[in-house]
Image (cartoon, rainbow, N blue to C red):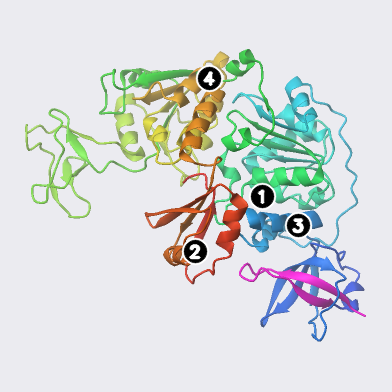
Amino acid sequence: MSLVVRILPDEPAVDRDFDYLLPDSLLAAPDCPPIKIGTVVRVDLRGRRIRGWITAVDVDPPKGVDLRAVKKVSSCGPPAGIVELASWACNQWMGSRVHFLRTATHDRVVSSIPDSTSRPPAVVPNEHLSQEAFRRRGAVVRTPPNSDDFSLAVAAASYGRALILTPTLARAQRLAVAMRRAGIDVAVVPRDWVASAAGAVTIGARSAAWAPIDDLEAVLVLDEHDESYQQESAPTWHARDVVLERAKRDGARWVIASPTPSLEALTCGAPLLTPDRTVERAGWSILDVVDLREEPPMAGSWCSETLSRVLRDNRKVVCVLNRKGRARFAYCDQCGELARSEITGRPLGLDGTRLVHPVDGDDRPAVCQVCSSTKFRRVKLGVTGVAEELTRLARRPVEEVSSETDSVAPEADLYVGTEAVLHRVDKADVVVFLDFDQELLAPRYRAAEQAMSLLVQAARMVGRREDGGRILIQTRMPQHPVIEAARTADPGSLARTELVMRRELQQPPEAHWAIVSGQAAAEFIRRLGIQDGLEILGPSNDRWRIRSDDREQMVATLKSVDRPPGRLRIEINPLRA
């Protein structure tokens, strides 16, 4: 008699299991992968042949129903624990199990997984804080920006089957090289999916949270504050939460490490471990703060006298400004009058020696209507405009960098760009934030944490204070908690301030949010109606915010609503709301 298996088809809109017969002919095939929970198969559903995952084996067939047969046993898949974890994730992030199992499944056919030969490595961590963190079985570790990840990674690997997350795959590969040189068997996923399934110490970026290594003994999340750990497309799952749930289920030790741990990490109930204050301070860079209210501008409102001196020195400088393009407005350099159209009165932009309006087509010479001056400056320059001004001020070439830039010129010594430049340039003598108030005042509830994250990245680029690297911040709020925390090398002071504010405003992690947007959002909110325990705010820019103290109740209520036709996006606790 054929074996009956339960299968989840690879169809997110379906998200239900179906029973199928598994013919003996498939089981007898010499290349048939093991039949167990997670194995990938091919089945017919609604006239199409699609992929699916086995979710139960040897189930009782439903009476009076003729079952269809599995057409092919394709590949080894994620272990049973990951399949169960996908069900948990559905109740956390408003997704279907298929979304998560796709991430957990190798993109190539795997006919078999070798027996585990993993053993704890002979190398042991030589850093006290790393050892102490894992002895606690669950801890948050605040590390200086310029500390070494290696000791924490070795401490995790010393317990055996370890899962280590890094913000980027490139960083995972660098760490893997160092650990292999130390004699540790390492798998970098997704490339080494099979080795991970066999029990090797597993390293990877966000998707590695769903790596096939099971029976975990240690979990490590490096740079937990990094936003790359949250999936951008819905469901917006967070890798930190996934691996902590895995550690909880497997009884594994876990450590979260970051120079500026998120409030979610700091309020998870685990102890916070910090290095000696002298060590932590030494791991930060020198911070110079320029109060733009006191310094005469050298180039409009963005170039202080301090910055002009830095630009004249023969040092490698990276300037950061999270605005692209050129400014749309211009003002008279002599009297300060805003350039306006003589016909419509709308502000005009500066294009060479002309004042223009990109929509109306208004175009006239750059002459002030009040004082007749021909000198104009742009209002709030973007990256492209700053690059042009920097070339004149510094009298050297400027390399412009944005997220669309494929590569940067390594021989350049003056860069300007969005925050992408902090990820494209390896080292610099000085990092300058031309308008840090833009980060501090961003209309996002995590603006302060995100600004602090930029300073961490800048500190790594210029190096420790003993190396002479400097960060220059231009601001009109020099006493802001973010700047004070970075100046004193004490991120904890910012966390304390932020936590009080989040509690008062009922923002995550003190409450839970769901952001609803898309073409069908209005109809979805109408169908949701008024619900106990949910507060609905909006719309604002065609987005609604739903707030609740109980995350599981909020998700369950949202899932119970009939989904209307049309595009609908629901984000649970998004980082950039």
Residue 191: give x, y in percent of width and height: 72, 50
- Whether residue 223 sits left or right of residue 303 in the image: it is right
Q: CA distance from mark 4 to mark 1?
A: 32 Å
Q: CA distance from mark 3 to mark 4?
A: 45 Å
Q: Nearer the viewer, mark 3 or mark 4?
A: 3
Q: Earlier in the sequence, mark 1 or mark 2?
A: 1
Residue 498: give x, y in percent of width and height: 50, 31
Task: Check the picture and name the quadrant holding the N terminus.
Answer: bottom right
Q: Is residue 268 magenta?
A: no
Q: Nearer the viewer, mark 1 or mark 3?
A: 3
For label 1, the SS is: helix
- Whether residue 508 sits left or right of residue 57 in the image: it is left
Q: Which residue is mark 3?
A: 84
Q: Which residues are magenta?
A: 1-21
Q: Earlier in the sequence, mark 4 or mark 1?
A: 1
Instruction: Residue type at mark 1: give it.
Output: Ser
Q: Which residue is mark 4?
A: 285
Q: CA distance from mark 4 to mark 2?
A: 50 Å
Q: Are the residues at dot 4 and dot 1 in contact (C-beta closer than 8 Å)?
A: no
Q: Which residue is mark 2?
A: 528
Q: Nearer the viewer, mark 3 or mark 2?
A: 2
Q: Which residue is mark 1?
A: 207
